Image (cartoon, helix red, strand yellow):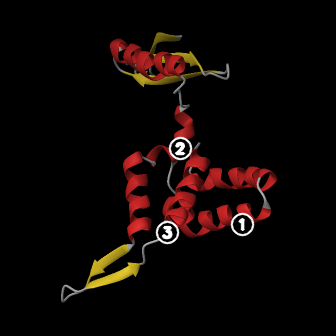
Amino acid sequence: MANVTRYKTSKGEVRYRVRYRKPDGTQTDTGGVRRKIDAENWAAKRVTVAKAEGTYIDPTAGKITVGELAPAWLAKKKLSAKPSHYRNLEGAWEKWVKPEWGNTPVSAVTREAAQRWVTGISQGKTAKDEQGNEIVLAKPRSASVVLRAHGVLAGIIG
């Protein structure tokens, strides 16, 4: 459930604040909405329905980068995986995931972007020189390499 309240800014303008509880029980709010109907729609779409469907994502969580989440995920994997498997995961992080996604905010990781990345790994990367000849920049990788890299990214962003 979310509450919409009216308030005035320091300039005397009317704004609306949406106050709601996150699934963990902590209370938070978002403000600065100009119209009450927009605030109510935001609350209904982003909070009430998402919590009921189990798809709620804390708005501040999207500002964290993939690189900031990786150490905790890798540490957890180090405790639960065999050393050889952990080395493979760590290697996939260092070689494939970190260079592409390390500085990317979690909110910017989309299915489409991840699919392009996976396709680039599996098919290799090519470019054309001035004469129109194709140059191989990176050779195609095996399905196991692609799956491991994708699995590391998916595991980190949860």
Q: Pointers 3 and 1 in contact (CB under 8 A)?
A: no
Q: Pointers 2 and 3 in contact (CB under 8 A)?
A: no
Residue for point 55% across, 60% down: 149
Residue for point 56% across, 31% down: 58
Gap between marks 2 and 3, in whole Å? 33 Å
Indicate the quadrant where residue 96 lies: bottom right
Gap between marks 2 and 1, in whole Å? 28 Å
Which mark, residue 63? Answer: 2
Mark count? 3
Sequence-wise, the earlier of marks 2 and 3 is 2
Q: Mark 2 or 3, which is nearer the eye? A: 3
Q: Residues within 10 Å of mark 1 (few under 14, many from 20)?
A: few
Residue behind mark 1: 87
Q: Residues within 10 Å of mark 3 (few under 14, many from 20)?
A: few
Residue behind mark 3: 142
Q: Amino acid type of disc 3?
A: Ser
Q: What x and y, as percent, mark residue 85?
A: 71, 61
**Local secondary structure at mark 1:** helix
Sequence-wise, the earlier of marks 3 and 1 is 1
**Local secondary structure at mark 3:** loop
In the rendered view, tell whether residue 131 sits above or below residue 56.
below
Residue for point 52% across, 55% down: 150
| The one of 63 and 114 positioned closer to us in this rendering | 114
Which mark, residue 12? Answer: none
Residue 15 in view, yes or no? no
Sequence-wise, the earlier of marks 2 and 1 is 2
